[in-house]
Every structure is written in structure tokens, then in C-alpha cells.
Amino acid sequence: MSRNKIFCEERFKTLLGASTVGMIIPIVVILSNAAIVGNVLDERALSAWNVFTPLLNFFIGIADIVSIGTCYVYTYKMGETDKLGADKVFGQSLLVSIVLSAITYFASGVCFEIYLNYLNLSPEITQYAQDCFCYYRYVLMLYPVYFLLSDMVLMDGDAACSYLSNVLLLVGGITVSVVACTNMGISGIGVGALVGTLGAILALCLHFFRKSNSLRPRFHFSFKLFAVTLKYSIVDASLYLLVGLQTFILNKYVIFNYGEFNLPVLTLVISVIQLTIIFDGIGQAMTPLANVYHGEKNPEGVRKVMKISIKAALAEGLIFTLILAIFAPMIPSAFNIESPLLQELSTKALWTVCPTLCCTALLFLFTSYFLVRQSITHSLTICVLKDLLMPILCVFAFGAMLGFSGVWVGLSLAPLLTLIIGTLLSLLRFKGKKFPLFLDESEKHHYSFDFVVTTENTMSIQQKVREILTQEGVSSKNITKALLIIEEIYMFLIDHNAPKVLLSELTIVVGKHVQMIFRDNGKIFDITSEISATSSFRGFVLKNIMINQEDKKNITTTSYNRNFIILPL
């Protein structure tokens, strides 16, 4: 049997690529907007874009307040095999996101005017900011629907539609922006973003026509369900709000203490640090897999997913660190920073902040993980420390001691200190539970097998299951039935999916009864009801077994097959 083929790892890799791209593309679009403004226009236009960015982050956070919670609640209910409840969650969130889009259109206009009046900027920068907002207002309006569809399509396992939507978002956000900005000035940035967002939404809608689609909204509204969804959304939505507030405070701090001349250096460093949101793609890939296991009350499954996720976080953090260290001298030119002094300061600042990026990656992962284990307050606490309190406190402290270079020392040490404090808080909060996952152990016994589906491997699995069920005291009659079901299901899957090589996970749960959970990455197919008795000899045998099997269920989850068979002891 293959030892290096783990079912959830293969699913994780598929989701990780799409989720990482999904996290980085919107940020790349925002960063490219800064580069386009700086190169096509001038430094005053770049300052206006930097002024607009905190407000943009604020409304991204508002838009995200529906989608993230929907993913957590939906996948948990899928783990519990409550498909009707999951459909109600999605239907309600779709309605709420449409209403939120309308509210955003009007609220953004009011907030923008108040924000500009408070800053009291020069007339030229104020005009640039107003021109930038002109079309971007419609982009902000679309964000609630876009984020919901983007997160849910990815959660449903459709990497292809997710990739396509991100390509369109990128092409619209950059290509159209360059052309429009050249002809229309800074307002062209909003036109490019609008075209890209509309294209991305249309691409995501293609998922609803695919057989693997499990997103079937049932429209209704419940204040109780909305409150639960909102509760889970607070952490990830607060990321944008906190980062926006952090950027605002640091802007004021640098201008007040070191002058407006140094503001481009902060703009560049903050923009690059915001790219670390790609690390949240690891959490997005982990969440649907771990949350389904959590809904099944399967701690072993959660451990497998988290082991893979931690390795991915460390690897991404190291790769990002190396890339930033190598290319730091080239980045200032991309932002059209021409002053030799500012270029030198920017390069040193980037070199200073990059060594602790592995800590940042782990913090992103564990804020998502604590949501999976339903420790929402704890997750929010770490998020506030990571994205607001520690960066601000460290910048103020080291800035006072070391001057302008202390700003970057503070931003570098903040993730490390947050990880240390977060670990100590976790040990206090979950005292008595095993570090680092602090899982609630199940009273049931779980046994899991990952394997490439072949005749030889199936026979080997049967032998292992026989030994387990005998040890658990299951009757010989039901052991024989369980082994027959395992053999017929996997032999049928081999025939049905030939010549594709299948990967599967078989989970045996022994409690008051024996539950067998079959996962595979073959053609989407309900083996509990869709088999034709005339399709093959295996089909005939399996069809008759399923007719006589009362406790059974099929739920397509994250674009893979998941079938449940329950037998008495």
C-alpha cells in the first residue's frame, strides 16, 4: 500500500493552489493600482491612493462579514450530514449579501466625505481621492456578492472556476486599469476594478451548472442563523478593518514624527506586508476539510489536515521570506520611488520586516483553526493582537528608541511577539488539552485508512477492518457484512472510474454502532441510490446490498464523494 498518498492531503493541495491565488489576486490588483497610479500619474496621485486604501480595506471587511461565516457554518452542517440546513445557510447568506451591496453603495459615499473632511488634505490630493472613488464606489457595492460566491465556490471544491474568476479579476484590474488610467486619470483605476469584478462574478456562476455543485440555496431568513453566521465572520472580516485602522494610525504617526517626505516608504512596506494575506489561503484550504471532520466528530481527521496545513504554512513563510529578501532592492522602483534616499530606506525596511514571516503564516493558520474548533473569542483575540495592537505598540516603542528605522524593527518583531503571547493565552484558555490543537477527544473510536484503490489494497484494508471490528466486539455477522460492503464498493468504483487511479479514505467509527465513511476522488456518483442493476455484475451486487441497507447516506462534499454506511454492533 502507498504510504505517501493521503486523501485529505491531495484535496488540500487542490484547494491550496486556488485559495492562495484567490487571496493574492485582489491584493495584487490593489498593489498594481498603486504602481499604475505612481507610474502613469505622479507621487501626489499615489498619496491620494494611499489615503483611499484604508477606506477600501474597511469596506472589504464589511463585504467579507457574510461570506466567511457562511463557509464555516455550511461545511460544519455538511459534516453533520445536514444538507437541508446547509442549503438554508447559503440561501440566507445570498439574500443578505444582496441587501448589503445596496447598503454599501450609499454608506460608502457618506463615509468617504466624512473621512476626507477629517484628514483635511491639500485640494489637489483631495480631488485625486474623489476621482478615484467615483467608479470604485460600484466595485465596493459588488464586493459582498463577489466574496460570498468566491468563498463558497472554492469551499465546494471547484478550483477551475476559482482560477478563472481570479484570472479575469487580474486582467480587468490591471490591463483595463492601465488603459483607462492613461485616458481618464486616476478614475480609470475604478473602471478597471469594476470590469474585473463583474467578469469574476460571471466566471463563478459557471459552477452552478457543474455536476459537482452542491450549492443549492434555499431562500429564507432566520435571525438566529444569521447571528451564528455573523459570529464566525467577525474574525476574518475584522482583518480588513484592523489593517485599515493600523494603516491609518501608522500614516498619522509617520507624518507627525518623520514628515510627509517619508510616507512613500511606509506605503511601500505596508503594501508588501498586506501581501501576507496570501497565508490566509492555507486557512481557507484547511477549513472545509477540517470543518467537515469536526462536524463528523472526527478528531483524527482534524489532526491529519492540520499536520499538512502547518507544514504548508512554514513552507510558504520561508518562500515568501526568501523572495522578499532577494527582490527587495527592485521593489521601490516598481512603486515609482525615484529618490535614492527613499529607495535605500525602502530596501532596508523590507529586509528588516521579512525574517518573521513564518510566524505571520502560522498566526493566519491558527486564527482559522480556532474558528473550526468554535473558539471564536480566542481567534478574534489573536487577530486583534496580530493586526492592530502588537504592530502599533511595537512601532511606537521601537520608533521612540531607534527613530525611523525602529518603525521597521517594530513591524518585524510584532508577529513573533504575537505568536508567543497567543501560545501562552492558548495554554491558559485550553488548560489540560494537548498542545497545539487542544482537541476535544471523541468517546467513539476512529480508525482511518488512506490508500490508492486497487484490488490488492482493498483486500489489505478488509483484513485490517476485520481485526479492528473483532477487537471492538462486533458480531461476526456484521463483520462479514462490513467486509462485503467494502469489497463491493471499491470493486465497483474501480470499474466505474477506469482507467483513472482513485484515491480514497475509509473511516471506521465504532460507538453505539459501526459507521463506515467512504471518501473518494472519482466521478461524482451516489453509490447508495444511483447504481443500475444492469450496469455490471458488481453493479448488480452492490445495488441489492444498498436496497437492503437502511442506514445510508450520500453527500457530495468539496467536490468529492462522501458515502455513509451504518451497521449495528
Image (cartoon, grey):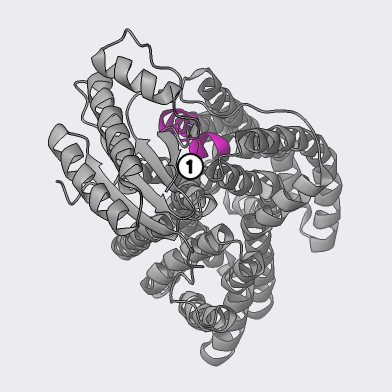
Q: Nearer the viewer, residue 354 or 338?
A: 354
Horizontal side, residue 214 vs residue 457: left or right: right
Horizontal side, residue 324 vs residue 278: left or right: left
Q: Is residue 92 visible?
A: yes
Secondary structure beneath dot 1 equals helix
Furthest toward the top, the residue is 534
Dot 1, crowdedness within 10 Å: few (<14), some or many (≥20)?
many
Horizontal side, residue 231 vs residue 174: left or right: right
The vertical placement of 445 against 202, above or below, is: below
Q: Which residue is identified by label 1?
A: 22
Query: Which residue corresponds to the image point at 12% horizontal and 37% vertical from the top-left?
Result: 456
Task: Tell me the quarter of the picture where residue 333 sits.
Answer: bottom left
Please say whether residue 1 is one of the residues in the magenta stretch. no
Please say whether residue 159 is one of the residues in the magenta stretch. yes
Query: Which residue corresponds to the image point at 43% horizontal and 64% vertical from the top-left?
Result: 361
Task: Tell me the quarter of the picture where residue 121 sits.
Answer: bottom right
Q: Nearer the viewer, residue 50 or 362?
A: 362
Q: Nearer the viewer, residue 137 or 529?
A: 529
Q: Is residue 554 visible?
A: no
Predominant secondary structure in magenta?
helix
**Relative image position of residue 137 (x, y in whole percent):** 74, 38
Furthest toward the bottom, the residue is 401
The amino acid beneath tag 1 is Gly
**Relative image position of residue 426 (x, y in whole percent):** 54, 78
The vertical placement of 64 against 87, above or below, is: below
**Relative image position of residue 38 (x, y in whole percent):** 54, 48
Range of magenta residues? 152-167
Query: Which residue corresponds to the image point at 38% horizontal and 68% vertical from the top-left?
Result: 358
**Relative image position of residue 22 (x, y in whole percent):** 48, 42
Task: Tell me the quarter of the picture where residue 202 sits.
Answer: top right
